[in-house]
Image (cartoon, helix red, strand yellow):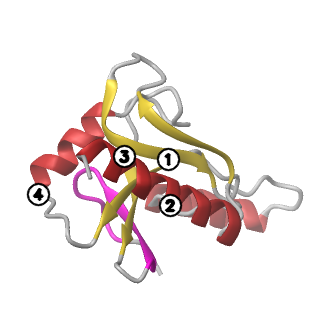
Amino acid sequence: MTESNHGRQLADTVLDNLKYQHDWTELQLLTHSPATSEPLMRPMVAGLPPRRLYVHPDDQIEMVKSIAVPDSKILDTPEVEWVLPTHISEKWTLKLFAAVFDSLPAHLSARPGRPKKIVLATIHDDSTIVYYLLHDGIVKPRQN
């Protein structure tokens, strides 16, 4: 199986899992950057989860403040997430992850610049999929 077919098959599997098991919407399987039409390093999935997956520690403070004020907007609106499908047998390096981040367009993200995180979907041979948040750089830990 060629690398492009393998990547496409992984992306199709992840897309189906997100759609039917995790209730994601507006899912797209992308092989080219929507901003520049340049090919992505490998096929990726973009979509909206049913709720926000990650709240940046700086945004947590705003959420706590907004809960105390009646009729305030809570920052729980889902954001478009990028998902990188991988197989458990693949060997990934920091350089490869950096190349993935470099290839992502900024316009699908709610924040300016390229996305600061992606969802890493790792598929096992038994078709189990495990999802991890992968950040671009160092992120301070969450406050409890």
Circle 4 residue = 93
Question: Toward the viewer: 94 or 39?
Answer: 39
Near mark 1 (Cα within 10 A), the count class, few <14, some 14-19 or many ≥20, is many
Q: Is residue 91 left or right of residue 107?
A: left
> In the structure shown, which secondary structural element does the residue marked by tag 4 occupy?
loop
Amino acid type, label 1: Val
Circle 3 residue = 116
- What label does residue 45 carry, if any? 1
> In the structure shown, which secondary structural element does the residue marked by tag 1 occupy?
strand
In front: mark 2 or mark 4?
2
Where does the image place residue 106, in percent across and percent down from the top left? 43, 28
**Alpha carbon distance from label 3 to label 4:** 18 Å
Q: Are marks 3 and 4 in contact (CB under 8 Å)?
A: no
Q: Earlier in the sequence, mark 4 or mark 1?
A: 1
**Alpha carbon distance from label 2 to label 3:** 21 Å
Q: Are marks 1 and 2 in contact (CB under 8 Å)?
A: yes
Amino acid type, label 4: Thr
In front: mark 3 or mark 1?
1
Residue occupying the point 81% across, 54% down:
72
Where does the image place residue 30, in percent across and percent down from the top left? 47, 36
Amino acid type, label 2: Val
**Alpha carbon distance from label 3 to label 1:** 16 Å
Residue occupying the point 45% across, 80% down:
128
Circle 2 residue = 14
**Alpha carbon distance from label 2 to label 4:** 21 Å
In front: mark 4 or mark 1?
1
